Amino acid sequence: MWRGVPLCDVLKRCGIYSKKHGALNVCFEGAEHLPGGGGCKYGTSIKKEIAMDPSRDIILAYMQNGELLTPDHGFPVRIIIPGFNGGRMVKWLKRIIVTTKESDSFYYYRDNKVFPSHVNLQLANAEGWWYNPECAIDELNINSVITRPCHKEILPINSWTTRRPYTLRGYAYSGGGKKVKRVEVTMDGGETWQVCTVDHAEKPNKYGKFWCWCFWSLDVEVLDLLGAKEIAVRAWDETFNTQPEKLIWNLLLMGSITCNRE
């Protein structure tokens, strides 16, 4: 659990009111000096329209789970942007700059990008793909994970265990505050999919956005589990985005979250 002050309130206190006029980007700069890109500081940016949107619940966080942030988690203050990729959530925050241009940090341009599959390192450098704003990752993709059975779990097959179903479990999440609508499991290589029970333990915020994981479960027969070479899960969100069954290659291997398999 994070605690902090809303970024939009801080910006308003500093005289920033309009979402759509004036400088259109909010840049965040950390205090650390990093070796890449000529020894620059870590920095990134988001659109001012997003930063000023109260439904986004973006905060300047100073506490986690009831305690002050530890150094590893960004003490004394860091940005938390629910539903966004972690690269936008700058730790050890030193400066916030409202500006016309996006962040000029080496790490903003050289990370958190999804290029077309044909773009290799040589093309990315030669054709300027690093600076194409259409390739930047902001909101997280739909994702789901199997937590039970766990890795290397052994399930004895006997008269006692086959009398009752085995419960598969896991969690699912989608970026941007989108609700996970459905989770499905296959045990026959994708020929058939079974719909799971989904539990949204945390309610949405007052704007209807879901920031927390939901949990899924499915009871299966132990003998069906015995005959399965693989278990795979996929989730669907409220816009019916789902996970691809096969990896879609890209240079940084980002954003292609396939069906989770055990």
Image (cartoon, grey):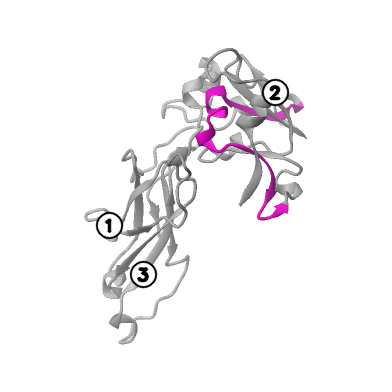
10 Å crowding of disc 1: few (<14), some (14-19), many (20+): some
Q: Nearer the viewer, residue 157 or 205?
A: 205
Q: Amino acid at mark 2?
A: Cys
Which circle marks residue 195 in the picture?
1
Q: Amino acid at mark 1?
A: Val
Secondary element at tag 1? strand
| Residue 177 visible at all | yes
Q: Earlier in the sequence, mark 2 or mark 3?
A: 2
Residue 7 % position (x, y): 63, 32
On residue 14, the disc is: 2
Q: Amino acid at mark 3?
A: Thr
Whether residue 33 is visible, yes or no, is no
State the CA–CA distance, disc 1 to disc 3.
Answer: 13 Å
Mark in front: 2 vs 3 = 2
Q: Marks 2 and 1, Cα distance to the nearest angstrom? A: 49 Å
**Bounds of the magenta segment:** 39-67
Residue 33's x, y, as percent? 77, 32
* Mark 1 or 3, nearer chain start: 3
At horizontal 42% and vertical 67% (from top left) the residue drawn is: 149
